[in-house]
Image (spheres, rainbow, N blue to C red):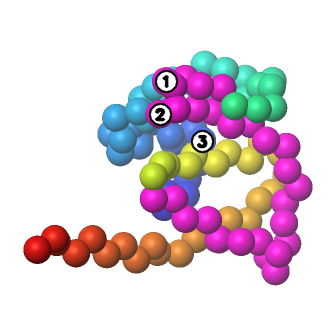
Amino acid sequence: MVIDRLENIEKYTLLHPLFEQAIDFLKSHDLHSLEIGKTELKGKDLLVNVAQTNPKEKENAKLETHKDYIDIQIPLSGTEIMGYTCLLYTSPSPRD
């Protein structure tokens, strides 16, 4: 989990091979003018999903866990409180 400000996003380019392309997109587009919905940047491997949601109260929020993808969340208006917890991952047992 990384929590930071959008102006520092370039610090994280090396965390994943697709981050450079994702960061280039974020820097070259007016995020407030993006249409609601999904836009594929590199097929299903890299996409932008713009959603209009209402922030949830802490009591009604559910924790998210991602094993198969990385989620860069950028609230464009208002304040959003995000919680997180460590995902305990155990590797599969070796086959005999």
Tell me whether the residue at label 2 lies in contact with that at label 1, contact meaning CB atoms closer than 8 angstroms. yes
Q: CA distance from mark 2 to mark 1?
A: 6 Å
The percent position of residue 23, horizontal first and vertical second, equals 51, 30
- The image shows residue 1, relative to residue 74, as above or below, that is below
Amino acid type indicated by mark 2: Asp
- The image shows residue 73, relative to residue 40, as above or below, that is below
Q: Residue at x 51, y 59 (%)?
A: 66
- Between 30 and 58, the residue placed more toward the observer is 58
Task: Please name which of the two marks, 3 or 1, marks the residue nearer to the observer.
Answer: 1
**Mark 3 or mark 1: whose residue is earlier in sequence:** 3
- Between 28 and 38, the residue placed more toward the observer is 38
Amino acid type indicated by mark 3: Leu
Instruction: Please indicate, yes or no, whether residue 32 appears anywhere in the rendered image.
Output: no
Residue 7 shown in magenta? no
Query: Where is residue 82, by image quadrant?
Result: bottom right
Q: Secondary structure at mark 3?
A: helix
The percent position of residue 86, horizontal first and vertical second, equals 46, 74
Q: Residue at x 82, y 80 (%)?
A: 59
Q: Secondary structure at mark 2?
A: loop
Residue 66 shown in magenta? yes
Q: CA distance from mark 3 to mark 1?
A: 22 Å
The percent position of residue 32, horizontal first and vertical second, equals 80, 30
- Between 81 and 93, the residue placed more toward the observer is 93
Decide if residue 66 is on the left or right side of residue 49. left
- According to the picture, the residue beneath numbered tag 1 turns out to be 42
**Where residue 6 is drawn, which disc sits there?**
3
Q: Which residues are magenta?
A: 39-67
Q: Residues within 10 Å of mark 2 (few under 14, many from 20)?
A: few
Q: Residue at x 84, y 60 (%)?
A: 55
Which residue extends farthest right?
A: 54
Amino acid type indicated by mark 1: Lys
**Where residue 45 is drawn, which disc sits there?**
2
